[in-house]
Amino acid sequence: RKEVEQDPGPFNVPEGATVAFNCTYSNSASQSFFWYRQDCRKEPKLLMSVYSSGNEDGRFTAQLNRASQYISLLIRDSKLSDSATYLCVVNIVGGYNKLIFGAGTRLAVHP
Amino acid sequence: EPEVTQTPSHQVTQMGQEVILRCVPISNHLYFYWYRQILGQKVEFLVSFYNNEISEKSEIFDDQFSVERPDGSNFTLKIRSTKLEDSAMYFCASLGQGDHEQYFGPGTRLTVT
């Protein structure tokens, strides 16, 4: 079983749509959870951390369910500039903060 | 805003040659990392470095790889004898004490021919 699994997509949505990405992780010792965004041939950039209580940053909402080992990201009112690959990322207790990446879900927002 | 820098942006080398990829982490950060991403695949952890020594390494990081922080600012990844399958983007990242966000450099694209 992969450590972090994501639907690869692509998700093709019109501007203004709401889109949801899901992610599952296999290691119950996972400690911290993140969504990163990666544009084509660029470095990953932190979009948001994910907390058990859920957190929101503008149009982006992230949720964590530790019991199900499941993480989600909701993007409301999609913009053309949201087109990118969204990476689900975890790190493990005692792992010197090494990050374990999912393969990413590609989002394409069209006019 | 402070940033991680990497040089070169693109390196082409022949199989069997040695390459050194260079990174300048954010100046007050204490934890340093190398990741790689083969084209079309996920980002994979290679090695973490703390207190002037390797703290953890992956299975990928075999004897052909080494890391160094020679002068307190640069952080280098050396591949002794490159193989075709080493072709990838190599990202350096750094992390401050007590932080949770790793800052990534723009990457070096390594092409082994």
Image (spheres, grey):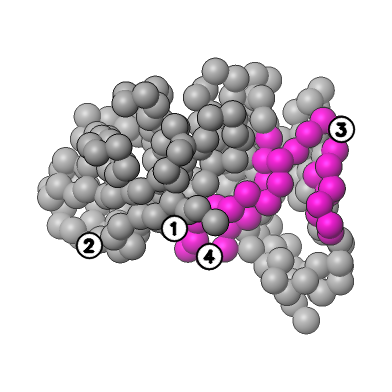
Q: Position of residue A102 (x, y in %)?
A: 60, 42
Residue at numbered disc 2:
B12
Left/right placement of residue B35 relative to residue B19 reads: right
**Mark 1 or 2, closer to the camera:** 1
Q: Earlier in the sequence, mark 1 or mark 2?
A: 2
B57 up-or-down from B33: above or below = above
At x 53%, y 30%, the residue is B97
At x 22%, y 42%, the residue is B79
Circles 4 and 1 on the same chain? no
Q: Which residues are magenta?
A: A33-62
Disc 2 and disc 4 in contact, CB within 8 angstroms? no
- The local crowd at label 3, few if under 14, some if 14 to 19, many if 20 or more residues have their Cα within 10 Å, is few
A69 up-or-down from B71: above or below = above
Q: Earlier in the sequence, mark 3 or mark 4?
A: 4
Label 3, secondary structure: give it: loop
Q: Amino acid at mark 3?
A: Ser
Q: Quadrant of residue B31?
A: top left
A105 up-or-down from A25: above or below = below
Question: Could you give the CA–CA distance between mark 4 and mark 1, rounded to whole angstroms?
Answer: 12 Å
Disc 3 and disc 4 in contact, CB within 8 angstroms? no
Residue at numbered disc 3:
A53
Q: Which mark is residue A40?
A: 4
Towards the viewer: B76 or A79: B76
Question: Could you give the CA–CA distance between mark 1 and mark 2, rounded to whole angstroms?
Answer: 17 Å
Question: Could you give the CA–CA distance between mark 3 and mark 2, rounded to whole angstroms?
Answer: 47 Å
The image quadrant where one finds the N terminus of chain B is: bottom right
Q: Amino acid at mark 1?
A: Pro
At x 84%, y 48%, the residue is A56
Disc 1 and disc 2 in contact, CB within 8 angstroms? no
